[in-house]
Amino acid sequence: MANPLKPENSIVTTCAYCGVGCSFKAETHKGRVVRMIPWKSGKANHGHSCVKGRFAFDYYNHPDRVRTPMIRRSIDDPWQEVSWETAIQYAASEFRRIQSQHGQRSIGAISSSRCTNEEIFLVQKLARAVMGNNNIDNCARICHSPTQFGMSATVGWGAASQHFDSILKADVILVVGVNLTEGHPVFGSLMKRRIREGAKLIVIDPRRTEMVTSPHCQATIHLALRPGTNVAVLDSIAHVVVREKLYNEAFVRGRCEWPEFEHWAALVADDRYSPEVIGPLAGLNPEDIRRVARLYAGGPNSAIYYGLGVTEHSQGSTGVMCLGNLALACGMLGREGVGVNPMRGQGNVQGGSCLGSWPHVFSGYRFVTDPEVRGSFERDWGVPLDDEPGLRLPNMFDAALTGHFRGMYIMGEDPVQSDPNQTHVIAAMRNMECVVLQDLFLNETSKYAHVFLPGSSSLEKEGTFTNAERRVNRVRKVVEPLAGYQDWEVVVMLMNAMGYPAKYAHAGEILDEVARLSPAYQGMSFPLLERIGSAQWPCDENAPEGTEVLHTVKFPRANGLGTFMLTEYVPTTERTNDQFPLLLTTGRILSQYNVGTQTRRTANSLWHPEDVLEINAEDAAVRGIHNDDWVSITSRFGTIRLRARLSARVNPGIVYTTFHHAKSKANIVTSDQSDWATNCPEYKVTAVEVLRIQPVLENVSANTEHLTEEVIA
Amino acid sequence: MSLHQSQSRADNANPPVIDIDRLILMANQIGDFFAPYPPIRRQEGLRNHLRTYWEPRMREALLAHIECGGKGLNADVIAAAQLLNQADAEQKGYYGPPKA
């Protein structure tokens, strides 16, 4: 069918959705985006796309978009539309007032993986150089912070060791806790291509996802483990690798710290990690654990891809270390076809991690407590910087409840909907005196905000994203910002209003500053990206056009060697009992994205109009639950209501839902358990009970603030 | 100088920055991770972690709780937290296995 619109203009840019970071030609007609055409020269997607990037772009022009700044003294007052200048001045004066009354560390900032690298870097600078503390965090705290921690500990950098195309040389693909065809569809298709060519697939996931069986995708082995037993199972695989001497001794002796290997081998080789012990605990056939170990170690090229099913646990960081240990022991790093690769849910999780939106490290994962590193930033920024780590996102909420944290700048995040134990988060938000929210829409968090600064979508600004393969790709302005400013310009205004002189002629100057202060980004610049399209960090004098595969010669650790961490299994305290006999785990679906702020405002919602609860027929039968019945799901933290869907994808004892729709309030029930190292929430394990209830009428929700969205529309 | 004498002496009347029960839980979780290491490395791993990742008021609250007996904390956490007070324990943070 002929396209009725003849686009007048097209600009190559990067998709705003998942961590694959596809390149698109955004076509415009009369100043409006009318088509997104996958760009065949895009090095991440080679001309492919999914239903989100291709079709779900209309949100940018949705009537719900807020186009005027707003303020209010109290969250009980109605919003008042004001000029940009008034809003910025109000935010700045409130932040300074709070600091003068409650101390320099009483405020902080949050950035988002939906922001560009330049914005993330600037928000970090806002906290450190302007607020004068290290209370800066980003939403990777609640998804991939364990990746940064666990991979830094073992292989030196919290980033994928491979480029995407590396999978075309893999013989064995080990997928742990990630649903590539739904969450990272374009990469999922690349994986299927390799499977069609004969690669073996191992899936470790409590659900029978599309990874396990779907067209062009059939797992050789599926370990449908019980949620919360990742570390036990990965240690048990390692047990077999050590006891059957399947490890690559030459690699470990040549490239790793041998004494640490010996400590690790002694731990996992203990009888308590034998498949015959761990199998029953995790609900697995011990022989399957042995087969996985033999297949992975046998390669010859075995590659690990993992996601939030590994990280979002009380032992999330330990789980990531298990994967690092395993790859090092089997020599599966440092060449094409192998590696350890975190799959990033949002477009710029990798960039958020690289660029210092963390309370303990500057860009490049370098500690704020390190005087030399800190000195380099102090010289460039012209102010003394705090030498102590700041509060992490969940710690900020905890500290808000005790009155020690009272003001927060949030760019592009919706912690009220996306963070766990929503009741606790709301109580903390209510305790704050000034919450400044910069977003496209009045999201759930806006109900507790005092200043709303209208944001710009990625179609309205200049910058870069770093995708899950470390590829830095240009985001280009396709249309003018609907509210007048690109997001980075708003941060610059706030910095100036708070008394710190900041001036950038364009976003490229921010990337230049990133390059000046971050060794792995040293060679990055807008001119380089114009010339070669995109580049994977590290990009420096040794690799002027970037690096596809990491760790080929040495690991980025002081002695250049990979190392092993002791990964004892410590069961989570969140466990089932008579009152809460089922385990709830959460995930995503192809057509929707994250909390749904964007995709729910597009026709993609026709594919997934609501979140449902997947429940095994056996568990449903004993509770008198039929397909499409309304059910209540109750945990120690709260109750939500969803429609039930009987599903063979989950085993008895396990239920599953997504969190794309605000009205489902899935995070009312999720627990306050978190990763031991990073406080990343344990979204993947919550003990619940499910009961059949009377049908819930739509619009019963008594949320008066919902009106605000309509008023703006 | 101890780094815990920093900011908030004036706030003594205030509650700790984060509810102490939550801090105890978090500290013991870190202790559980380092438990398989030999005692000296175990404590060093804990010390490095607390020093590098915990905001100073969180460390201060933990130490204040230890001064009052440290109820609920496991023994390694208590020993490691006390290392935070030693000036010679002031060293650069690091990733990876606890140094021997």
Image: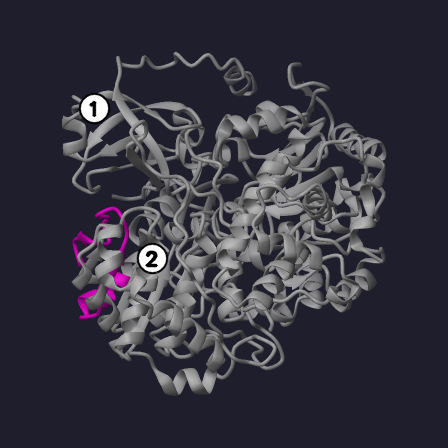
Residue at 50% in and 33% down: A61
- Horizontal and vertical percent position of residue B67: 72, 45
- The kind of secondary structure element at disc 1 is loop
Q: Alpha-carbon distance for marks 1 and 2?
A: 36 Å
Give amino acid for label 2: Ala
Assess whether residue A200 is covered by the magenta stretch. Answer: yes
- Horizontal and vertical percent position of residue A183: 35, 49
Assess whether residue A615 is covered by the magenta stretch. Answer: no
Comes first in the chain, label 1 or label 2: 2
Q: Is residue A108 above or below residue A329?
A: above
- Horizontal and vertical percent position of residue A659: 39, 35
- Horizontal and vertical percent position of residue A9: 49, 49
Residue interval drawn in magenta: A191-218
Query: Which of the pair A396/B81 is nearer the observer?
Result: B81
- The kind of secondary structure element at disc 2 is helix
Which is in the foreground here, disc 1 or disc 2?
A: 2
On the rendered image, what quadrant is the N terminus of chain A found in?
A: top left
Residue at 57% in and 53% down: A352
What residue sits right under mark 2 in the picture? A232
Indicate left or right for A378 with A526 as reference: right
Query: Which of the pair B92/A275 is nearer the observer?
Result: A275
Q: Is residue A625 above or below residue A339?
A: above
Query: Which of the pair A208/A279 is nearer the observer?
Result: A279
Q: What is the crowding at mark 2: few (fewer than 14 residues within 10 Å), some, or many (at least 20)?
A: many
Q: Is residue A695 above or below residue A98?
A: above
Q: Are marks 1 and 2 in contact (CB under 8 Å)?
A: no
What residue sits right under mark 1 in the picture? A628
Q: Chain of mark 1?
A: A
Residue at 44% in and 56% down: A21
| Residues at marks 1 and 2 on the same chain | yes
